[in-house]
Image (tube, helix red, strand yellow):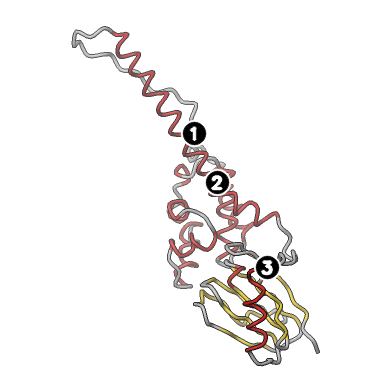
Amino acid sequence: MASLGDELRAARESRRLSIPGVSEQIHIRSVYLQAIEEESWSAIAAPVYVRGFIRTYARFLGLDAEDAVARFNGVVAEPGPDLKFSEKPKLEKFPQLGVAPSVWIRAAGIAAVLLVLFVGYDYYRLQKSTQAAILAESVPAAKPPPVAPAREEPRRAQRSMTEPATKGFSVKVEQRSWVRVMLDGRVVLEGVFEPGTQRVFAGRTATVRAGNAGGIVVAINGKDQGTLGPLGDVVERTFTLAQ
């Protein structure tokens, strides 16, 4: 059975996605995605952040997120993978260079303070990078999109007047994004699409999930439904189509 990191890497490569491309979509730094695929858990720090990253990454790749987290828990249950910040460095004898021991002790203390500051700053950046993923998981999938800013109304009104009415469920890409469309429970579209891409489907219900919700515009029978959600957010919405 393939390891968790190998399975995530294989799923990403099968979709022809690069690590920087995935990082841009799910807002997790490339260095952490690389560490997950290599199973270098100590490079990501606390297991609670590793679990959040794995859950978001697995869902983006269409894998079972909870199974992935459970497999990680089975690995970290063994001793050794987590960072041990409480360990004290081993002290060596000072060389006989004619310098008082207090000078070395003072230098070691300054180095320790600088190390603590560096670790604290990196930990702060880690919290910032995981905030988007944690917030995305806490928002219900059926959350309605926010009201569009007033400055976008003229553009949307112009699009509705200039484009002909189209029967069916329409998905249009206005900004580059990963998109998955499920029609009546079946995946009919999945991948990373460029601006200008548009697809029309027919069915009873449609579920759309996008990594950049603000770049995806949907319409039902030619009636503009607006964007799927805010720019840069991972959003999933379900639409009931007219019979």
Quadrant, the C terminus: bottom right
Q: Residue at x 63, y 81 (%)?
A: 171
Residue 48 lies, with reference to residue 138, above or below; the image says: above
Where does label 1 land, which residue?
120
Q: CA distance from mark 1 to mark 2?
A: 13 Å
Q: CA distance from mark 1 to mark 3?
A: 41 Å
What type is the residue that disc 2 sits on?
Answer: Lys
- Residue 128 disc label: 2
Q: Nearer the viewer, residue 13 or 159?
A: 159
Q: Residue at x 73, y 88 (%)?
A: 221
Where does label 3 land, which residue?
150
Residue 63 vs residue 90: left or right?
right
Mark 1 neighbour class, 10 Å CA radius: few under 14, some 14 to 19, many 20 or more: few
What type is the residue that disc 1 sits on?
Answer: Gly
Residue 64 vs residue 16: left or right?
right
Mark 3 neighbour class, 10 Å CA radius: few under 14, some 14 to 19, many 20 or more: few
Q: Residue furthest right?
A: 243
Element class at badge 1: helix
What type is the residue that disc 3 sits on?
Answer: Ala
**Which of marks 2 and 1 precedes in the sequence?**
1
State if disc 3 and disc 2 touch (CB < 8 Å).
Answer: no
